[in-house]
Image (cartoon, helix red, strand yellow):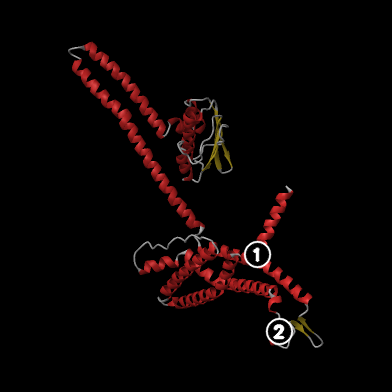
């Protein structure tokens, strides 16, 4: 333990000594130095453009001027995101593009004027200047004073050689003038410079952290943009899932009940033809057809149960889960503690989630027992399915249908968590938003 602690301290000390000459420190320092002239440029154009556009709003000319300023500031944001990516190593995503509902210049200008992202770019162009002045000044002071005093023993000879001073003059009053000229003073100045030089990388890093926050908050996509993107993705998942379900239903009808009913119709036709010449054979054929009708009815009931079980609609989640648990290959204990019934959509997703998980237990787990617990916690519906099988289920859903369940739950802001250590059973916890009927 002691050796580990000493090694950690040695690494930390070595890192502190390397920090002033690391490429990251120089890139961040260059970012702060370049930020001031760019911010002056952004600020000047943004303030001038917004002021001019606002003043011209009494005429129609103000609208295109303001739209042009907004487009220009979005261009500034593109430059800043690129600068942050190259010099700070921060990859900020592009904000959502400005889309006009109609074609034409007026529609495009209206979309820009209503774009919150464009106005955030204008805000960045304005408020970044005072911060850039502060960051530029502080970083430059630390950097120049640190290196100047650290290297003072190398260049202090300039004063006696080319000036009338014995060393660097720190202050002067009527009676006394203080110079850094003795060996002790030179050594002390060098130590002070070393302290400044070692502190400079962390000062620069702190300053650039503020820039990272400003860029991410004002020049990146907003939370609303992220939410819209997420909902668009979820909508695609829902559409794909619905299409897959329709294909499955069509396949089950075509290969199951429909094929059986076609064969049944042919058998009844043959029985009708034999009715007059061989009544006993016709009776046997009708009896066989009666059995086929029962099988077809059972297949249709199973298909209807797979679409939406009647017991779920009539009696709720507790009874429906008990019904699906009774068909599992292993004994399943079901416990449902719900104050009332959730919305039909949430109830259906919960039912099919448990149904899919119990099918996985029957086919893949090798479990002897399983349990299903459902309860409400705050504004969430929680489902936990546990088995004592071999474990090792993969959270990405490879081969177990868990990937499809994860996508289905994501579509309604749900979560699926799989805990399945090899040889120690599987616990799957699903969380859905609670929506009352």
Q: Which mark is residue 202?
A: 1
Q: Is residue 187 above or below residue 333?
A: below
The kind of secondary structure element at disc 1 is helix
Query: What residue is drawn where x is 53% and y is 35%?
Result: 392
384 displayed left or right of 248: right
Query: What residue is drawn where x is 56% and y is 44%?
Result: 379
Q: Nearer the viewer, mark 2 or mark 1?
A: 2
The answer to whether residue 315 is seen in the rendering is no
Q: Which residue, given by chain and number where applicable, does mark 2 sit on?
A: 159
11 displayed left or right of 97: right
Q: Nearer the viewer, residue 433 or 137?
A: 137
Q: Which mark is residue 129?
A: none
Q: Estimate how packed mark 1 is, as few (under 14), some (14 to 19) or many (20 or more) residues with alpha carbons within 10 Å.
A: some
Query: What residue is drawn where x is 74% and y is 82%?
Result: 167
Q: Mark 2 and mark 1: span between their CA atoms?
A: 32 Å
Q: Nearer the viewer, residue 155 or 243?
A: 155
Q: Are the residues at dot 2 and dot 1 in contact (C-beta closer than 8 Å)? A: no
């Amino acid at each position: 333990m002691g050796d580990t602690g000493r090694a950690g301290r040695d690494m930390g000390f070595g890192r502190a000594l390397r920090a002033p000459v690391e490429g990251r420190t120089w890139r961040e320092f260059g970012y702060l130095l370049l930020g001031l002239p760019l911010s002056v440029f952004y600020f000047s154009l943004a303030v001038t453009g917004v002021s001019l556009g606002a003043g011209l709003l009494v005429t129609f000319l103000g609208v295109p001027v303001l739209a042009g300023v907004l487009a220009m500031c979005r261009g500034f944001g593109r430059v800043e995101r690129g600068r942050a990516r190259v010099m700070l190593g921060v990859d900020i995503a592009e904000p959502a593009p400005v889309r006009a509902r109609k074609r034409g210049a007026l529609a495009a200008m209206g979309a820009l004027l209503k774009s919150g992202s464009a106005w955030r770019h204008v805000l960045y162009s304005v408020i970044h200047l005072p911060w850039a002045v502060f960051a530029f000044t502080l970083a430059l002071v630390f950097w120049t004073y640190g290196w100047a005093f650290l290297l003072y023993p190398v260049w202090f000879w300039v004063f006696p050689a080319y000036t009338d001073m014995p060393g660097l003059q720190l202050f002067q009053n009527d009676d006394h003038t203080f110079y850094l000229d003795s060996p002790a003073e030179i050594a002390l100045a060098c130590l002070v410079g070393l302290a400044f030089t070692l502190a400079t990388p962390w000062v620069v890093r702190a300053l650039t952290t503020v820039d990272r926050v400003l860029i991410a908050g004002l020049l990146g996509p907003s939370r609303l943009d992220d939410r819209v993107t997420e909902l668009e993705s979820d909508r695609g998942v829902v559409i794909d899932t619905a299409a897959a379900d329709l294909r499955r239903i069509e396949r089950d009808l075509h290969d199951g009940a429909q094929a059986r009913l076609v064969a049944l119709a042919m058998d009844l036709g043959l029985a009708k033809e034999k009715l007059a010449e061989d009544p006993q054979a016709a009776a046997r054929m009708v009896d066989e057809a009666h059995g086929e009708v029962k099988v077809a009815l059972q297949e249709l009931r199973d298909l209807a149960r797979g679409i939406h079980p009647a017991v779920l609609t009539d009696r709720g989640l507790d009874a429906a889960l008990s019904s699906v648990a009774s068909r599992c290959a292993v004994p399943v204990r079901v416990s449902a503690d719900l104050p009332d019934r959730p919305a039909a959509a949430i109830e259906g997703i919960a039912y099919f989630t448990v149904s899919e998980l119990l099918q996985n237990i029957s086919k893949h787990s090798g479990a002897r027992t399983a349990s299903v617990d459902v309860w409400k916690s705050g504004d969430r519906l929680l489902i936990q399915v546990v088995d004592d099988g071999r474990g090792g289920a993969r959270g990405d859903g490879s081969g177990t249908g868990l990937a499809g369940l994860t996508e289905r739950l994501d579509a309604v802001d749900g979560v699926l968590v799989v805990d399945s250590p090899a040889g120690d059973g599987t616990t799957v916890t699903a969380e859905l938003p609670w929506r009352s009927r």
